Image (cartoon, rainbow, N blue to C red):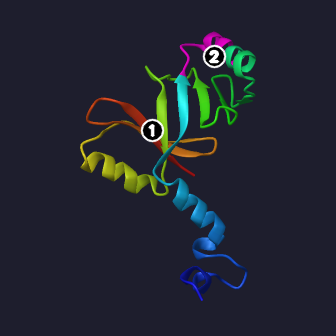
Amino acid sequence: MSEAERTRDQDGQGQGGQSQDALELAKAAHNRIDFVEFPAPDREALRQAQEFYTRTFGWKYQKWGEDYIDTADSGVGSGLASDEPTSAPLAVVYVVDLEHTRKEVERNGGVIVRDIFSFPGGRRFHFKDPAGNELAAWSE
């Protein structure tokens, strides 16, 4: 019997009530860029960018309020934001443990530029690496 089989409960759930498949999927996605957020200076620019990408590439978007839309049609997930937009596209890294990653960013010379906050779908924080690039880390 494998280690994974030994850790399963009677109902096929592993630790914390998550299925082994869900735990394996989270591990596989951990520490990988899985989203890019593009800034829009205002709602009109967001609307125009959405129209551009829809007409040019056929991407369909989901609206999350007036200032944010995202799509899975772009390969890596992507979004457009007009509320507190960054100055450049923002690479977003999926992590399993957000608080641990925040500590590691600071321990390794990164600077937190926006502390942990909630959004539809999870929580994230923004940081700058030692070269000055702004990224975000997120988790459910």
Residue type of the residue flagged with mark 2: Leu
For the record, the magenta segment spans 39-50
List the residue tagged with mark 2: 46
Residue type of the residue flagged with mark 1: Ala
Residue shown at the point (63%, 71%) measured from the top left = 20
Is residue 16 highlighted in magenta? Answer: no
| Nearer-N-terminus badge (1/2) | 2
Identify whether 3 is placed above or below 47. below
Residue shown at the point (73%, 28%) measured from the top left = 61
Residue sitting nearer the eye, 69 or 123: 69
List the residue tagged with mark 1: 136
Horizontal and vertical percent for residue 105?
32, 46
Residue sitting nearer the eye, 34 or 66: 34
Q: Residues within 10 Å of mark 1 (few under 14, many from 20)?
A: many
Horizontal and vertical percent for residue 32?
48, 47
Is residue 46 highlighted in magenta? Answer: yes
Dominant SS in magenta: helix
Horizontal and vertical percent for residue 49?
64, 15
Horizontal and vertical percent for residue 68?
63, 27
| Image position of 105 (left or right of 75) | left
The answer, for residue 18, to whether it is visible in the render is no
Image label count? 2
Q: Residue furthest bottom?
A: 1
